Image: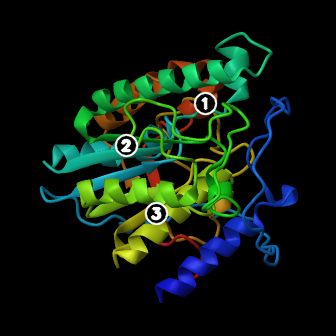
Amino acid sequence: MLRPLVFCVIAALMATQTPSARAAPKKPSAAPATTTPTPSRAPPAPPKLEPPTGVPLRLPTSPALLPITLATSLLVVSPHPDDEVLCCSGVIQRVLHAGGHVSIVWLTSGDGSELDLLVVEKSLLLRPSKLRELALRRMQESRQAATILGVPSDRLYFLGYPDRGILPLFTDYYITTYRSRFTTATAVPYPGTVSPGHPYTGLNLEHDFETVLDKVRPTLVLAPSPRDSHPDHRATGLVTIRAMARRNELSRVNYWIVHGGEFWPIPRGYEPELEMTPPPAGHGLSQHPFKLEPDEEQRKREAISAYHTQMEVMSSFLLSFVRTTELYSTTPMPGN
């Protein structure tokens, strides 16, 4: 049954590549004039999948996560530095409190943010060197946020693949080397990553992710839903699904959404007394709330605030995730 599920997710990811189907926030259009290698293949586009609309008013309270115990080994799979604290701070703290182990892996280091360059670096020019410096800052902020939550430094794994380039690695650049249009890098450029110098290919990304799985041996994985509107998030969900399916451990994965639709989370801003409302992008998924204790919610805010670069750019959005609940689904797509 795993092959049809993986095929369904791949089809959905590729279908949402079309401009009309993207729901991720718009970015400035300026980019350096770089050349990109000719793709090794160009698979035909599958039929367009239109995301359903509508949001249920309230969620069932049945648990989604596996039991959290001393034996729990949690792996949080994060597309960018900051996603892990937005989606999963409560569960991270609960596992550590129970005596279990927590590990975090970041697929990118957030080196494709033109808005960060404008606001943080006060630069109108898209300079690759500045974006690489920004990525190093975001990696350091990740370490600080993890420390606030109590995650040991030896359980933090950075892969260093290209921001806004994860999905192309699984369509046109699985074997052919990809060139980042933001940093101009064609290989992992950052020290402290799992495989520095690894060429940017989907094959290498999967290899590095499998290396992390071998080290962590997770009993519980929290990964982005393929219904998330950001392409890096959708592709990160695909990476997780493919890897866990090969291990016959797909049942250990729960899914979360950060980019859930325009104006979501509702309401925007710091509202710590409210529950998280279901994202429109998750319509059709069986989403379950995970209730945070007051001290867990407070530490979550502190961890989010450790991302100084992101707080300068989008504090209202980030603080919208400080709510009394976090939402998870046990399936990546409706009907699975």
248 and 293: which is toward the camera? 248
Q: Which of the two discs, 3 and 1, sits closer to the camera?
A: 3
Q: Is residue 279 in view from this perspective?
A: no
Q: In which quarter of the image is residue 144?
A: top left
Quickly name the residue at label 3.
240
Q: Considering the numbered disc 3 on the image, is that residue within a helix, a strand or a loop?
A: helix
| Neighbourhood count class around disc 1 (C-alpha, 10 Å): few under 14, some 14–19, many 20 upward | some
Residue 312 in view in this figure: yes
Q: Where is residue 67 in the image (x, y as percent from the top left)?
A: 23, 65
Type of the residue with mark 3:
Thr
Mark 1 to mark 2: distance in Å? 35 Å
Residue most extreme to the top: 122
Q: In this view, does 304 lie above or below 242?
A: above
**Mark positioned earlier in the residue sequence (1 or 2):** 2
Residue 251: name its quadrant: bottom left
For label 3, the crowd category at 10 Å Cα-Cα, with few meaning under 14, some 14 to 19 and many 20 or more, is: many
| Disc 3 to disc 1: CB gap under 8 Å | no
Q: How far apart are marks 3 and 1 (CA)?
A: 30 Å
Q: Along the horizontal axis of the image, is 262 left or right of 8?
A: right
Q: Which mark sits nearer the N-terminus, 3 or 1?
A: 3
Quickly name the residue at label 2: 194
- State which quadrant residue 18 falls in: bottom right
* 282 left or right, relative to 307: right
Q: Mark 3, mark 2: which one is toward the viewer?
A: 2
Residue depicted at x 58% and y 54%: 201
Q: Nearer the viewer, residue 173 or 237?
A: 173
Vertical comparison of 139 with 263: above or below? above
| Circle 1: residue type | Gly
Kind of residue sitting beneath label 2:
Val
Q: Which residue was labeled with disc 1?
A: 269
- Please tell me how crowded label 2 is: few (under 14), some (14-19), or many (20+) other residues with Cα within 10 Å: some
Q: How far apart are marks 3 and 2 (CA)?
A: 17 Å
